[in-house]
């Protein structure tokens, strides 16, 4: 069991161990949605919510169902099912109460299911043996970290696409990857502040 | 997509024309993380090739019996089962590498390529072409990752597969083994390819 207080873990997950910038998770929706700030914000918020809740759910399922039954290897299947069910729920809520947001996010909301970051966070908290509270903090922190990254890149891309004349082939994914690289570089400045494994 | 392709065409499609990483920029999440060492990349690629190929085959075999509405769920379960096999095998035979790969093997499940191929190809094509398609796509994917690993490992550690190849006095570029190095390498690679071989991507929808 690691001895880190949950508050520290929360910030570590945002800054020093950003799930997108240091663990490369959740890149697919990231590349697609980061074109502008607004949808990035919406998707980011959805990810924060889903990630926090699924981290908690998966923690409970792993320690209270799978471990006692010696079925650890089935965690992949179970985790993905829980995440899928949860995303379905969020989708229905967003469609009902925020139709404008639903229209913007379109196909990408169901894609949260296959957002590696969500499953990744759940797998990390098992591997690193976090406690319940730590898991919750880690889930929330990773979600916020992902959101911060996608919004930052969204804002940069918005500006770049409006103002710069880009060389051939650079527009789109190549540029996004390089911007992300620069951002990841900037985030390495935080490393050393807090050490989590 | 053209109706029926010959087997060779399927291969060319997967390896070059529709290369999942370079053309479609899909599924880079879980695997980009392990490209700092060539060994890890090789193991991860093997796992991915197995998963994509076998799940394409299985989805294709079951395509007539899977109800449309629950097909995503069925595909996810099929993929997850194969990933579990991969995970257990790696943990049993290569414990060190399994340790190093951490959760990334499990994350093959959420790799967009696996499901992308099931959804786009295997679910309405016969088993054999689906098998080939899965194989070609995952090989195309693996090649790109190997290229990235071949850039990152020598520059970051001065080695290839643990053997020293850089001259004495070479200072390793620590940045290359960290995350930014991977982003830059892939970004430059995609840029280079799009700049020099643009025609294929023209009508491709960016996802």
Image (spheres, coloured by chain):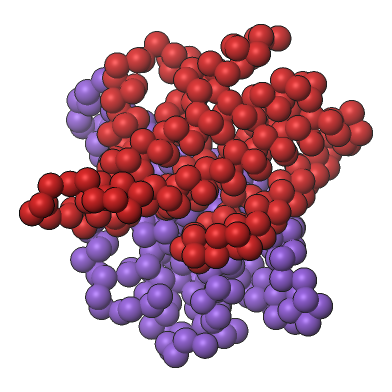
Chain colours: A purple, B red
Q: How many marks?
A: 0
- Whether residue A148 appears in this view of the structure is no
Give the percent coordinates (x, y) of residue B142. 48, 36
* Image side of residue A135 versus residue A164, left or right: right
Please tell me in which quadrant of the rendered image residue A11 appears.
Answer: bottom left
In the displayed image of the protein, which residue is found farthest to the left? Answer: B169
Give the percent coordinates (x, y) of residue B200. 44, 14
* Image side of residue B120 versus residue A40, left or right: right
In the displayed image of the protein, which residue is found farthest to the front? Answer: B163
* Image side of residue B173 versus residue B95, left or right: left
Q: Considering depth in this image, is B145 or B120 the residue closer to the camera?
A: B145
Residue at 21% across, 57% down: B174
- Whether residue B157 appears in this view of the structure is yes
Quadrant that contains the C terminus of chain A: bottom left
Q: Considering depth in this image, is A121 or A38 the residue closer to the camera?
A: A121
Residue at 63% across, 34% down: B116
Image position of A175 with respect to A40: above or below: above
Image position of B81 with respect to A33: above or below: below
Give the percent coordinates (x, y) of residue A185. 23, 56
Residue at 35% across, 15% down: B197
Image position of A147 with respect to B194: above or below: below
Q: Considering depth in this image, is A172 or A123 the residue closer to the camera?
A: A123
Q: Considering depth in this image, is B78 or B147 the residue closer to the camera?
A: B147
Give the percent coordinates (x, y) of residue B137. 57, 29
Residue at 17% across, 55% down: B172
In the displayed image of the protein, which residue is found farthest to the right? Answer: B65
């Amino acid at each position: 069991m690691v001895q880190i207080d949950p508050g520290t873990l929360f910030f570590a997950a945002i800054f020093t161990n950003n799930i997108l910038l240091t663990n490369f998770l959740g890149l697919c929706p990231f590349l697609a949605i980061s074109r502008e700030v607004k949808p990035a914000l919406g998707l980011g918020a959805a990810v924060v919510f889903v990630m926090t809740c699924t981290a908690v759910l998966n923690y409970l399922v792993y320690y209270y169902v799978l471990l006692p039954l010696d079925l650890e290897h089935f965690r992949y299947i179970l985790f993905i099912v829980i995440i899928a069910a949860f995303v379905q729920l969020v989708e229905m809520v967003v469609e009902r109460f925020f139709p404008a947001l639903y229209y913007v996010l379109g196909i990408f909301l169901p894609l949260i299911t296959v957002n590696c970051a969500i499953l990744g966070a759940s797998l990390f908290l098992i591997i690193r043996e976090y406690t319940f509270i730590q898991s919750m903090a880690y889930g929330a922190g990773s979600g916020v970290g992902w959101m911060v990254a996608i919004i930052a890149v969204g804002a940069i891309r918005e500006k770049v696409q409006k103002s710069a004349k880009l060389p051939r082939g650079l527009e789109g994914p190549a540029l996004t990857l390089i911007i992300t690289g620069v951002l990841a570089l900037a985030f390495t400045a935080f490393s050393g502040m807090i050490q989590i494994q | 997509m053209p109706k029926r392709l010959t087997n060779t065409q399927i291969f060319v499609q997967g390896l070059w024309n529709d290369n999942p990483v370079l053309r479609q920029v899909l599924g880079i999440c879980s695997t980009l993380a392990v490209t700092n060492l060539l060994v890890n990349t090789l193991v991860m690629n093997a796992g991915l090739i197995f998963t994509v190929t076998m799940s394409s085959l299985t989805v294709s075999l079951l395509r007539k019996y899977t109800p449309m509405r629950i097909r995503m769920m069925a595909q996810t379960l099929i993929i997850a089962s194969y990933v579990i096999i991969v995970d257990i095998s790696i943990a049993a035979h290569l414990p060190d590498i399994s340790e190093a790969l951490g959760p990334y093997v499990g994350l093959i499940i959420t790799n967009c390529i696996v499901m992308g191929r099931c959804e786009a190809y295997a679910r309405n094509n016969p088993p054999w072409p689906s098998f080939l398609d899965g194989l070609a796509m995952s090989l195309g994917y693996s090649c790109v990752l190997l290229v990235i690993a071949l850039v990152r490992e020598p520059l970051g550690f001065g080695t290839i597969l643990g053997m020293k190849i850089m001259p004495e006095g070479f200072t390793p570029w620590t940045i290359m083994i960290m995350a930014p190095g991977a982003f830059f390498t892939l970004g430059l690679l995609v840029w280079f390819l799009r700049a020099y071989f643009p025609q294929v991507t023209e009508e491709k929808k960016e996802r």
